[in-house]
Amino acid sequence: MKAIYAGSFSPPTLGHLDVIRRGAALFDELIVAVAGQSEKQYSFDLAARADMLRRVTADMPNVRVVSCTGLLVDLARREGADVLLRGLREASDLPFEQQLADANRMIGGFETLFITALPQYSRISSSIVRDCALHGAPIAGMVPAEILEDIYAVYGKGPHAERKC
Ligand code: ADP
């Protein structure tokens, strides 16, 4: 089975990486699709987000990172994917995820499977990482070590950046 895990990944977090790792163990192939166009404003451009994901998944041979600039269901069809994969942190994620899953079933006939976050990652989101980085708070416990410098390059290395969180 081939699955596609799509998201903004702006930036990728340990929570995303955990979904990728657990997803890669379940499927023959897992494609990570980095969203290129939406109404969202991204702090990291598409190439930078894809590059960070490639580096943090380099040890997973059945994971492939691609950019997605159009509809996810079109990419899923082109890639011959069987299902879509998403992560759920807590109940408040559900309404939006359900809406997205319904839309992707309606417009593309794709089902979405969900992996629930590990408790230690359930509070981590890209927006929390961005807010912490913006104010120089420690983020080392939230994102893969390989991409810390990428984030500091965008936000600067604040006074508390090296502290443990
Ligand atoms: P999007 O902008 O498409 O919601 P995100 O990059 O924020 O993209 O998240 C992609 C997917 O990963 C979503 O399904 C989201 O719920 C899930 N996710 C985000 N953070 C975590 C986490 N810490 N643990 C598990 N899943 C997560």
Image (cartoon, rainbow, N blue to C red):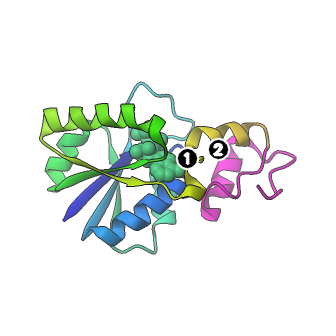
Q: Position of residue 1 (x, y in %)?
A: 18, 65
Q: Which residues are magenta?
A: 137-165
Residue 150 appears in the picture as rendered:
yes
Q: Amino acid at mark 2?
A: Val
The residue identified by callout 1 is 11
Q: Quadrant of ligand 1?
A: top left
Above or below, 11 against 69 in this view is below
The residue identified by callout 2 is 129
In depth, the one of 30 and 97 nearer the eye is 97
Q: Is residue 25 left or right of residue 8?
A: left
Which quarter of the rendering shows the C terminus?
Answer: bottom right
Above or below, 96 against 150 in this view is above
Q: Quadrant of residue 7?
A: top left
- Residue drawn at x 52%, y 34% as measured from the top left: 42
Residue 48 appears in the picture as rendered:
no
Check contact, mark 1 vs mark 2: CB within 8 A.
yes
Q: Is residue 71 left or right of residue 150?
A: left
Q: Position of residue 120 (x, y in %)?
A: 60, 58
Q: Mark 1 or mark 2, which has the lower sequence index?
A: 1
Q: Secondary structure at mark 2?
A: helix
Callout 2 environment at 10 Å: few (<14), some (14 to 19), or many (20+)?
many
Is residue 159 highlighted in magenta?
Answer: yes
